[in-house]
Image (cartoon, rainbow, N blue to C red):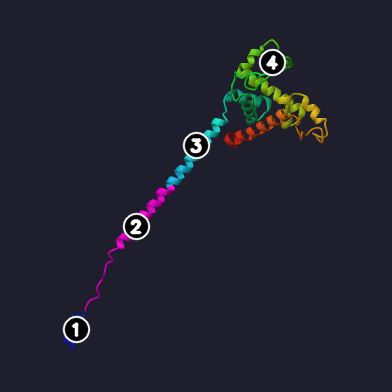
Amino acid sequence: MAQRARRTGANRPRARRYRSKNSGGGVKVFAAVFAAVVVAAAAVIFVMNFYHKTESNLEKTAYPIEYSNYVEKAAKEYDLEPALIYAVIRTESRFNPDAESSVGARGLMQLMPSSFEWLAEKRGEADKYTVDDLFNPKVNIDYGCYLLRYFYDYYGSEKCAVAAYNAGFTVSEWLADSNLSPDGMTLETIPYPETSEYVERVQDAKQKYIKIYFS
């Protein structure tokens, strides 16, 4: 009986092990999907980087920082923000050193010859330059920033200084009008459309320069 039992045990069918024909295929499919996701993500990152780089380059082209050596020197000397100086230059002349307006303003910061001569006398440099030197970027930026600083100190605010750079001492009349300035110092309304638009353009350009180069 024992022998028979052993034979019976020996002859007991063994459980068959089945290997799925698709077990390796599932791994391959997962790997392919994962690779595709990685490639797609990389492509998205590349496109985004390319877009941001292109956008940045376009902004820098629209808002250049030319003549930076003269601008930085004047910014330190007259305690002005470089972004403000670049904004004035861009608004006035689009960085064209040979620019001349219909009323005779010249150079990068569009100074009038009469204003230039007045400033030269104030600085004791009446015989140092001629009005043709307004086409010299070094001289023009130096004198333009000197005038901007003068108006800044005279009126006590950037907005009034920029308005005066365009309209001169007419700003004093506006500040004296309670309908335009409630306290005689803050210019809430600029009655000249040209000056109002000018101030807005300079302020907008300044913010652009800060965003692109100084933030």
Q: Amino acid at mark 2?
A: Val
Category of crowding for the residue at label 3, using alpha-carbon neighbours closer than 10 angstroms: few (below 14), some (14–19), many (at least 20): few
Q: Amino acid at mark 3?
A: Thr
Q: Secondary structure at mark 1?
A: helix
Tag 3 or tag 1, which sits nearer the N-term?
1
Q: Secondary structure at mark 2?
A: helix
Category of crowding for the residue at label 1, using alpha-carbon neighbours closer than 10 angstroms: few (below 14), some (14–19), many (at least 20): few
Question: Dividing the image into 4 quarters, which one contains the C terminus?
Answer: top right
Q: What is the quadrant of residue 190 in the picture?
A: top right
Q: What is the quadrant of residue 211 in the picture?
A: top right
Q: Is residue 180 left or right of residue 45?
A: right
> In percent of the image, x 33 and y 59: which residue is there?
27
Mark 4, residue position: 113
Q: Position of residue 3 (x, y in %)?
A: 16, 86
Tag 4 or tag 2, which sits nearer the N-term?
2
Residue 155 vertical placement versus 8 (above, below): above
Mark 2, residue position: 29
Question: Dividing the image into 4 quarters, which one contains the N terminus?
Answer: bottom left
Tag 4 or tag 3, which sits nearer the N-term?
3
Q: Is residue 149 left or right of residue 53?
A: right
**In this view, which residue lies farthest toward the bottom?**
1
Mark 1, residue position: 8
Tag 2 or tag 3, which sits nearer the N-term?
2
Mark 3, residue position: 54
Tag 1 or tag 4, which sits nearer the N-term?
1
Q: The magenta stretch spans which residues?
A: 13-41
Tag 2 or tag 1, which sits nearer the N-term?
1
> In percent of the image, x 81 and y 27: which residue is there?
173
Category of crowding for the residue at label 4, using alpha-carbon neighbours closer than 10 angstroms: few (below 14), some (14–19), many (at least 20): some
How far apart marks 1 and 3 lie (CA) works out to 82 Å
Category of crowding for the residue at label 2, using alpha-carbon neighbours closer than 10 angstroms: few (below 14), some (14–19), many (at least 20): few
Q: Amino acid at mark 4?
A: Pro
